[in-house]
Image: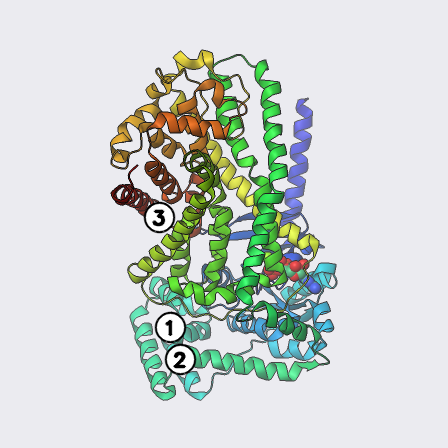
Amino acid sequence: MKPGDTKGDDSRVKVEKSKENALKRIVVAIGGNPNSGKTTIFNHLTGSHQKVGNWGGVTVEKVEGRVVRGEYEIVFVDLPGTYSLTAYSIEEIIARNFIVDEKPDVIVDIIDAGNLERNLYLAVQMIEMKGHFVFVLNMADMAEKQGIRIDGDKLSTLLGGPVIFTTGIKGKGVDRIVDEVIDVYENREKKVRHIHIPYGREIEEEIGKIQAVIRKDRILSSKYSTRWLSVKLLENDKEVIEKIKRYFRFYDEIISQAGKSREHLKKIYNDDPEIIIADQRYGFINGLLKEVISYEKRDRIDISQKIDKVLTNKFLGIPILFFFVWLMFQVTFGLGAYPMDWIDRGVRLLVDVFSPLFPEGIFKSLLFDGIIGGVGSVLVFLPNILLLFLMISIFEDTGYMARAAFVMDRVMHLIGLHGKSFIPMIMGFGCNVPAIMATRTLESRKDRLLTILINPLMSCSARLPVYILIAGAYFGNRAGNVIFSLYALGIVLAILVGRFFRKTIFRGESEPFVMELPPYRIPTVKSVLIHMWERAVVFLKKMGSVILAGSIIIWFLSSFPAHEEISNNTVSGADTAIEVTSVNQGGQEDIPIERSFIGMIGKAIEPIFRPIGFGWQEGVSLITGFVAKEIVVSTLGVLYVGGDNASGSMDYGNLGSVIKQRSGMSPLVAYAFLVFVLLYTPCLATVVAMKRESDSLKWTLFGVGYQLVLAWLVSFMIVKVGSLFLVV
Ligand code: GDP
Ligand code: MG
């Protein structure tokens, strides 16, 4: 490239930059209830100009998009979808803080026109926060189908901002959002009309008193809406109290006034002020709806209610749910087996074709055993994961998932959790990673943590290869029952541990909640696919990198320092995708891997497992299994069968009998080993997911630790108690 070229490029960039600087920048927050069509509209508005990140310090996704229109650069920020703006969940706090602290120029509230009442609860809380609003009544098509007529002009007057009707999936009306945003921005000085929700004389009086104290801090009270802060204080909002503590000079005085006001109101109403305040908001909404809404006919609601009569029926509900869950597994694992096989073959072919091209040695071993083996081990599960997510997306988008939670509510109360926690538990049978991600739908942090902590006890599909291997070898035609007993043990322990934690560390009842039962909807193929894909990408990006790193570490540990001696017999490349650690060894008598770091670790930890009866090989496989539980199988293959058999088409049946001959484990100990695999520390990807979702290292470590202890204790007890009854 000539130097001149670079220069030309540079100056072009500069021109563009300066042009951008001349643009007027409008920051727009997009808020709204979950499922109101936020993402659909956001995508329509910003196309591919999106930036995905996380909200500071938390795991909630933050999406930003840019649109240039005329002399304006409009930055849309997608707030997390929430039903209200109390400080109930992380999402709510994020959405709220963004509006309060960042003061976006314009707030666009996406409202599901077909569920106006529910959606207005959020809208009303937003207008209390002051700001400049555009109200988008999306799903106009649905509202029309339901025979709901909405008087947009009147609604606009009552809410204090322009109202636009859109049909997000068709993109109808969406462009007008940009026009209105610019209009509101340009006229923000003139057109301001702040709507107050009237709370009645008593509450208004107390609001006034608190406002008076807050206003003593001139600077801050010009930054925040004093009315909003006062209402929040009356509602005893922990977040706002914290905020005031941090920033306001007259903290003590403010809090003491708020306390007095709350007491006063409690006496008058004989109820908590937050309840009275919520009642008033609903009152406001009801009044507003009477003004703006008229009905023609209510087809969709009727149909939904009819379907619900069957799907949430007292007796039929649970069997139907189990049928759907069964179907989900059939699709996920039955259908998934084919593409899984293709990928497996593809990876083998890749290895077969390319591995002869590389000289034997450490680099080849790293590339094929470590990296391709490791990444391949994630890749083979992609079809299962995609299908699982596809099914879950369909359940969610049709509205069935909410019904599942509703139906299971009573059962989940056994663990002190409510129905919503059931969804992650079901998903756990597939893979604990997405299951733990699914706990985001739980509002209460306690419920979230508890669900995350017991989730790995649901036996995920990665443990199945180990069960099949060992149970097949030891228990012959009773293997099926043995495997079933493991799944059952996992569920029983999840219930017991859940109850125990609920009674000790997460004391208190699960938070009461209203199960939203949105009307059924036939999802569009596009939106189901998008939802599925979004999740899959998160999974691939985050977990792929972790598994890659973990695989390399294990490869390293099993290849050094003994690598020099064994590099000559390194497997010639036909490793299956999941055999990450298939560094080659000699026979049983002389096992170089014993001299590798992992062998040393195995020897070092042997005493821990000796009371249960596991050998050092089992110990090592449990360690490598930490990366992904399937690796327990490939590790045992490497340690027991050695090079030739560990490569290529490893015969699980055969490997099982070799283990049975050589390991010296009795059937009882072998069963204890399976129980250990079921219960012990979740795989690396799950631990990472736990950390991401709990946002707490402490709880993550606690989860890992308690499971290790549980696994050891239960396995030990099985061996000890079992040997009293069985003569093996
Ligand atoms: P979000 O949760 O608010 O981000 O909502 P999404 O954008 O994911 O939309 C939820 C569902 O509603 C998806 O299945 C969309 O395809 C669908 N949807 C979005 N806008 C409309 C609309 O105007 N009419 C209808 N009928 N469906 C819509
Ligand atoms: Mg969305």
Q: Looking at mark 1, is its residue's CB closer than 8 Å to ligand 1?
A: no
Question: Disc 3 marks which amino acid?
Answer: Gly
Whether residue 38 is visible to the viewer of this picture, yes or no, is no
Q: Position of residue 317 (x, y in %)?
A: 55, 66
Q: Mark 2: which secondary structure?
A: helix
Q: Looking at mark 2, is its residue's CB closer than 8 Å to ligand 1?
A: no
The quadrant of the image that shows the C terminus is top left
Question: Disc 2 marks which amino acid?
Answer: Pro
Q: Quadrant of residue 27?
A: bottom right
Residue neighbourhood size for the residue with mark 3, other residues' Cα within 10 Å, grouped as few (<14), some (14–19), many (≥20): many
Question: Disc 1 marks which amino acid?
Answer: Asn
Q: Position of residue 414 (x, y in %)?
A: 39, 64
Q: Quadrant of residue 479?
A: top left
Q: Name the residue tied to disc 2.
A: 273
Q: Position of residue 587 (x, y in %)?
A: 40, 16
Q: Quadrant of residue 713?
A: top left
With respect to residue 301, does 66 lie above or below? above
Residue 372 vs residue 199, the one in the foreground: 372
Specify the quarter for ligand 1: bottom right
Residue 531 vs residue 395, the one in the foreground: 395
Q: CA distance from mark 2 to mark 1?
A: 9 Å
Q: Mark 1: which secondary structure?
A: loop
Q: Name the residue tied to disc 1.
A: 236
Identify the residue at image location x=62%, y=79%: 158
- Labelled disc at residue 703: 3
Task: Say which label, 3 or 1, has the lower sequence index.
Answer: 1
The count of marks equals 3
Q: CA distance from mark 3 to mark 1?
A: 32 Å
In the rendered structure, the answer to whether residue 231 lies left or right of residue 42 reads left
With respect to residue 457, does 652 lie above or below? above
Q: Position of residue 612 (x, y in %)?
A: 28, 37
